[in-house]
Amino acid sequence: MSSPDTDEIDPLVFGYGFGADGTATPLEWKDVRENGHPDFQLVWLHLNRQSQKTQDWLIGKSGLDWLTADALLQEETRPRAVRHGKGFLINLRGVNLNEGADPEDLVSLRMWASEDLLITMRGRRVQAARDVEQLVKAKEVPYSTGALVALLADALTDRMEPLITGFDDEADRYEDELLDPKVRLSRSVLPEFRRRVLRVRRYLIPQREAIATLVRDGVQSGIFSEQDAYFLRESADRVTRLSEVIENIRERSTVLQEELIQEGSEETNQRLFVLAILSAVFLPLSFVTGLFGVNLGGIPGAADGQAFPLLVGALAVSTVLVLSILRWRRWI
């Protein structure tokens, strides 16, 4: 199925203007396009980055400089928080909860946060933004940019915790299966598991640093209050804990994969050992039968009817002797 034309994508996912009393008024795209929100103390716009209308507005009418607009529209981003002029340029990542997508394929939430304007942008649906929108509708959000950013960071962390917990449980299950002789763990499972863990770890570590930067520089900028900084510290602490858990899971998966490889090597060595024992046992037999099987004259016992039973008995004694020697040497 082809993707829709960028001109047909709705640019505004949702938007709210906050009055002096904290009342949140829903905004429409025409309000954004015409900059029709001078009476609001704060405006939050959640935009669709894939829309051409969003891109045109951001570059031409938003009032942001080209560097900020370009950063918000980049295809690939990593979590970061940078103070730029009178605001912050923030990139965070969240769990991908879109239908048919892998949760560990984290989605990006880009933000421009100034004292009177918060712009959040997504290419794919970010459920954490909807979570905060529900709080706005329920009038449970202080009308400040810092509070909204802190709640977004907290919501992203809330959505990420079940994914990390699932990874931890999955690693426990693989450990149990590896120790259970009745269960044979596929060799392709652990590399795939490690790949999924590393995809999350790639963004989780810098996300911890990004939130820590907001905690450190946010209050100094005047955008974040002490209460906002407190919530950000809690989010930073939770992301740090999740980072430690994901690091532990990565190390465990590495050890599990090494144990699986070692187990496979031991099985191979055991089979080779059995083949070597069989070769040692049958080598004398093969030599004697090969020697007596040549089609030449002068073979001992060719005309004696008792020669064959004697040969079979001698081969049996030889086999017992070889096995006794191997046993005595403790090779079997």
Image (cartoon, rainbow, N blue to C red):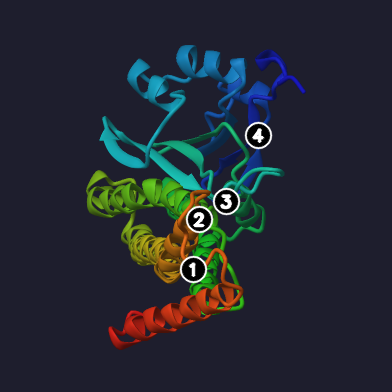
- Circles 3 and 1: CB atoms closer than 8 Å: no
Q: Nearer the viewer, mark 3 or mark 4?
A: 3
Image location (x, y in percent) of residue 251: 34, 63
The amino acid at mark 4 is Val
The amino acid type found where label 2 is placed reads Phe
What type is the residue that disc 3 sits on?
Ala
Residue 212 to residue 314: above or below? above
Question: Dot 4 surroundings within 10 Å: few (below 14), some, or many (20 or more)?
Answer: some
Q: Give the image location of residue 3, x and y in percent.
A: 71, 21
Which of the two discs, 3 and 1, labels the residue nearer the N terminus? Answer: 3
Q: Is residue 255 above or below residue 321?
A: above
Q: Secondary structure at mark 2?
A: helix
**Quarter placement of the C terminus:** bottom left
Who's the residue at 39% across and 68% down the image?
280
Check disc 3: other Cα within 10 Å, few if <14, some if 14-19, many if 20+: many
Q: Which one is in front, 294 or 225?
A: 294
* Residue in view at x 57 percent, y 36 percent: 46
Residue 249 higher or lower than 122, as above or below: below
Helix, strand or loop at label 4? It is strand
For the residues labelled 2 and 3, the Cα–Cα distance comes to: 25 Å
* Quadrant for the N terminus in the image: top right
Q: CA distance from mark 2 to mark 4?
A: 34 Å
For the residues bearing labels 1 and 2, Cβ distance under 8 angstroms: yes
The residue to which callout 3 is attached is: 128
Mark with earlier residue (4, 1): 4
The circle drawn on residue 171 is: 1
Residue drawn at (49%, 19%) of the image: 58
Can you give x and y, in whole percent of width and height, for residue 123 in the image?
A: 57, 31
Q: What's the CA distance linking mark 3 and mark 4? A: 13 Å
**Residue under numbered circle 2:** 193
- Provide the residue designation for mark 4: 13
Residue in the picture at 47% in, 20% down: 62
